[in-house]
């Protein structure tokens, strides 16, 4: 067994890194052995997992590596044989080496973006970093994930045009803005535990799509 490593990153705060990491790791964790690495000193992923109840524990193991920034790849390597998937929730900065180091060992980089021009402009830095790391790690696959889409307008034409300017495409599945994602954080679970069929469906589709990208 050698785990596939999925790094969720964007230096923009509030775009949904932790929300997507937790829901994807939680969904995939129901069927496979998953480790979730919290790389954010704010510790939201760790707190999320520890908010779950004893009779419905979070379906993935959680560990914080937020106190180390260099050689994160070396640290992650230690766990490759014990898990099938390792998710890394990155800090909202690319100024320290955490993200670049995690990307060195990644199979997949997911970049959540709110599909609005300002948020897409802000993702240019992470695109540069990914393209630099790709020169060393040639197995790295990258995808934008449109998060907090609004059902009435879907993704605007302007945003879609900006998305096509990136070096990598967006996933086919989009994630919409739904209260279920906020509720899931509050009780330490995933949207699968909630009565919101649309949220369940979109997160399962995204999980399936990312698994097919790396398997
Ligand atoms: N698809 C969504 N629908 C509704 N709220 C969302 C969604 N994704 C994220 N949020 C909310 O937006 C805020 C920021 O999300 P978070 O995952 O913490 O972002 P990041 O980790 O990138 O800083 C949180 O309050 C979260 O609950
Ligand atoms: Mg976060």
Image (cartoon, helix red, strand yellow):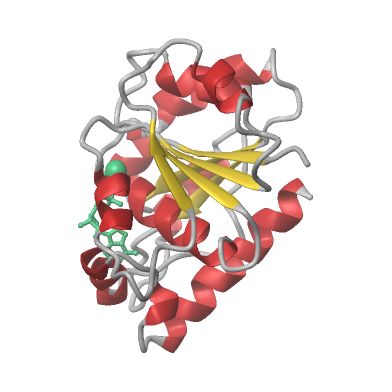
Name the residue furthest front. Answer: 54
Q: What residue is shown at x 40% (from left), y 63% (from top)?
A: 58
Q: Nearer the viewer, residue 121 or 29?
A: 29
x and y percent of residue 43 in the render? Answer: 25, 39
Q: What residue is shown at x 38% (from left), y 53% (from top)?
A: 115
x and y percent of residue 18 in the render? Answer: 35, 49
In the picture, measured across the screen, residue 93 lies left or right of residue 139, that is: left
x and y percent of residue 29 in the render? Answer: 56, 61
Circle count: 0
In the picture, measured across the screen, residue 55 lies left or right of residue 168, that is: left
- Using the image, determine if residue 168 lies above or below residue 209: above
Q: Quadrant of ligand 1?
A: bottom left
x and y percent of residue 109 in the render? Answer: 57, 37
In the picture, measured across the screen, residue 55 lies left or right of residue 103, that is: left
- Using the image, determine if residue 125 lies above or below residue 189: above
Image quarter for residue 131? top right
Q: What residue is shown at x 47% (from left), y 50% (from top)?
A: 61
- Using the image, determine if residue 193 lies above or below residue 161: below
Q: Nearer the viewer, residue 127 or 192?
A: 192
Q: What residue is shown at x 56% (from left), y 20% (from top)?
A: 73
Q: Nearer the viewer, residue 145 or 186?
A: 186
Residue 129 visible here: no
- Using the image, determine if residue 3 lies above or below residue 106: below
């Amino acid at each position: 067994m050698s785990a596939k490593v999925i790094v969720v990153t964007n230096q923009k705060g509030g775009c949904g890194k932790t929300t997507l990491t937790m829901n994807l790791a939680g969904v995939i964790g129901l069927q496979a052995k998953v480790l979730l690495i919290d790389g954010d000193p704010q510790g939201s992923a760790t707190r999320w997992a520890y908010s779950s109840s004893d009779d419905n524990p979070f379906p993935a193991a959680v560990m914080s590596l937020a106190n180390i920034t260099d050689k994160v790849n070396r640290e992650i390597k230690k766990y490759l044989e014990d898990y099938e998937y390792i998710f890394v929730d990155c800090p909202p900065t690319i100024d320290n080496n955490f993200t670049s180091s995690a990307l060195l060992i990644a199979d997949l980089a997911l970049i959540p973006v709110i599909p609005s021009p300002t948020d897409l402009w802000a993702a240019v830095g992470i695109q540069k970093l990914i393209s630099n790391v790709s020169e060393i790690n040639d197995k790295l696959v990258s995808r934008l994930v449109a998060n907090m889409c609004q059902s009435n307008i879907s993704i605007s034409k302007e945003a879609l045009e900006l998305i096509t300017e990136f070096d990598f495409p967006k996933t086919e599945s989009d994630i919409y803005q739904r209260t279920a994602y906020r509720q899931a954080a509050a009780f330490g679970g995933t949207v699968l535990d909630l009565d919101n069929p649309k949220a369940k469906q979109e997160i399962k589709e995204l999980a399936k799509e990312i698994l097919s990208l790396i398997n």
